[in-house]
Image (cartoon, rainbow, N blue to C red):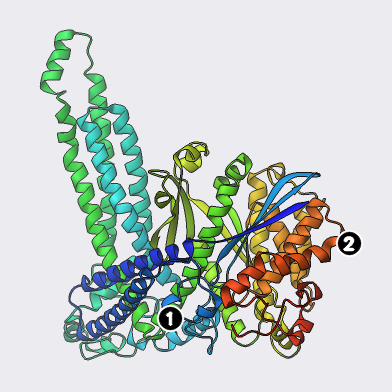
Amino acid sequence: MLVREQMEECALSFRVPKQLLALYIQEDMSRVQDLRALGELSPHWDNLRKEVMTRYGGVITSYQDTLAELDKITGCSFKPSCCKAQKSLEFIPINLHTQRMRVTCPRKTDSSYDIVTVGAPAAHFQGFKCGGLQRLLSRYEAEKKSTAYQCIYYSPEHTAKAQEVLSNMSLLQPLITGLADQLLQAAQEHSSPGLRDSLKNLSDKTEQFVHTLKDELVKNALLALHTARPGYVAKNQKQTPGSQATMRGEEGPLPLKHQDSIPHHNEYDEEEWDRVWANVAKCLNCVIAMVDKLQEEDGSKKEPILEQQLADVITSHNPGDWREQLHPAVTRLKECVTEVVEKAKRAMTFVLLQEAACSIPQGFFLQQRRDVVFSQALAALACGFVMRLYAGMQDKDFLRQLHLVGLVAQFESLLSTYSDEIGMLEDMEVGISDLQRVVFHITEAKTDNLSDLQPLVRGRRDHFTVEVPLPQLVFQTLPDEIKEGKPLRVFPVLFNVGINEQQTIAERFGDISLQERINQKNFEMLEAYYKSLNGMVSVECLPCFQSQTDIKELLETLGQNVVTKKRKNVEILWTAGMICRRLNGIRFTSCKSAKDRTSMSVTLEQCAILRDEHQLSKDFFIRALDCMRREGCRIENVQKNIRCRKYAFNMLQLMAFPKCYRPPEGTYGKVDS
């Protein structure tokens, strides 16, 4: 048996975070511009707006400085573990590498097994004194309600809805405008098929647009914005002196009960918004009616008499006539869409102003922390996705699974639930969960040059798209669904089992509920993915393995393990990893810096694969494991990170490790890293 390990840095370690930073800057600058566009506000609201804009300005400046520092870096494409708390590198994943094991043996065709290793996505520079994102966000939501007297409290669901509405409008408005122009072009060309196709697309997008805005939140936010205009309360005082107790005036905020929208006011025309967005649907109906009329007239005027045909061409079948008749209705539709967008954009911006105002300064610090963690997680995911895509390019069943259901991305973590590492795990949990907001698109590269084959990140915080260009010849072999730009989903799941001496302390004297909750929750997500996959793709289409245990049995075993009270139950990690490979998934392994504990896990997994899939004799298992740990890529990775060819363990620490996670004699020693 010939086994070859191959480890490489990934250029996406820096490329993806730099693209994300540029998008964050662009999004926040746009937010500042939207706040300015709210128009004149009463002094209280104007002061809040200025404070929020100042905070955004600070974030923008900080991100611009970080991006400038990253642009200066040339050479290696990885961040070593010794730099994990460096401010200028906080968006960069720690020690991100791809590793491939190639196996050649007479009993089975040549095989490759891939894994991505990366330090746990976490905000090391900001530290973990107060915990990680999961704990900080929970505490923040509770505290925000108690400070909402300065503003209108909107729930996290309403805030997310406001961001969704803004995102959908920014996407749909240009689409509707473009489709309306296509409709006029088809009319200009006197093309009935073109008219039908353009009208169908325009109708679909316009109906989607109207549905997006048919939400009480928009109407309530418009009312709230109306009350924040200068003079609103003063005018109200003259008519209803006692009603100001629930409002806020020019002198500052007055007590306000926690609520998701402010009280109604009889001077505000609440039906105006309903009329405005309903006008979009009415305008669309006018366009549809006009197209129907043009096509009916076109059919009725096709007389058999040549003279009549000539008369029709001269009097009413000038190709410009259709466009001229359709143009007013299309123009009115576009004007109505623009009017709706302007109103809804101001309303949703006002909702987000409340979110920002209620959360100063903690909300901005948390957003920056979340940006940092997500950047590290996305860089790792993009790296793993590209690696898995190229490995499965010749597998039609894999490509079918990719566009029908998507891929599972299984993150294995070896962090303890004690001291700083519990904060790292809390960061990692949120960062991995946020990857659900990511989809992938496969595109055809302009050329086969390496610079044109680099992934490109687009979008904003609530939704990102990673475009992966492929060489032209490769792209042509893909299924039509992928070539047509179908979004490809990824289902991230995280399983954690601490194995070091700190986990021993946590299990005996501390709290491991975070680990238990993470494993239970992500088991349910993995099980749901399998059920979805099972309904779309035949089991025969999944990879063949020598082990006779089917995926359903493995899931049952995993389910039992996540609820079993057992110390350092690493069988959870082993079983989850096996399921991931059976499901054509992407495998990731992490610890604090993806160096020492990660090396023990990766080498153990590789030897288990050799035993289970390539009949490695049990008598040679430990010898192969020690060889990989002593001579393989992982010890090289350690030296690359800390310039020392020893794993950073001492004998006392190793006594707490499960036996199969201990390195061979002579390969370890306590090292400052």
Look at 25% across and 52% down and name the residue there.
279
Look at 63% across and 52% down and name the residue there.
532
For residue 619, the mark is 2
Instruction: Locate residue 55, reporting x and y percent.
Output: 31, 81
Q: Give whichever of discs 1 and 2 has the lower sequence position.
A: 1
Neighbourhood count class around disc 2 (C-alpha, 10 Å): few under 14, some 14–19, many 20 upward:
few
Q: In front: 327, or 559?
A: 559
Q: In front: 34, or 337?
A: 34
Query: Where is mark 1, residue-wise?
Result: 87
Label 2 secondary element: helix
Label 1 secondary element: helix
Amino acid on which disc 1 is placed? Lys
Q: Is 486 rendered above or below residue 72? A: above
| Residue 215 seen by the camera | yes
| Residue 271 seen by the camera | no
Look at 22% across and 85% down and name the residue there.
240
**Residues at marks 1 and 2, CA–CA distance in whole angstroms:** 48 Å
Placement of the C terminus among the 4 image quadrants: bottom right
Amino acid on which disc 2 is placed? Asp
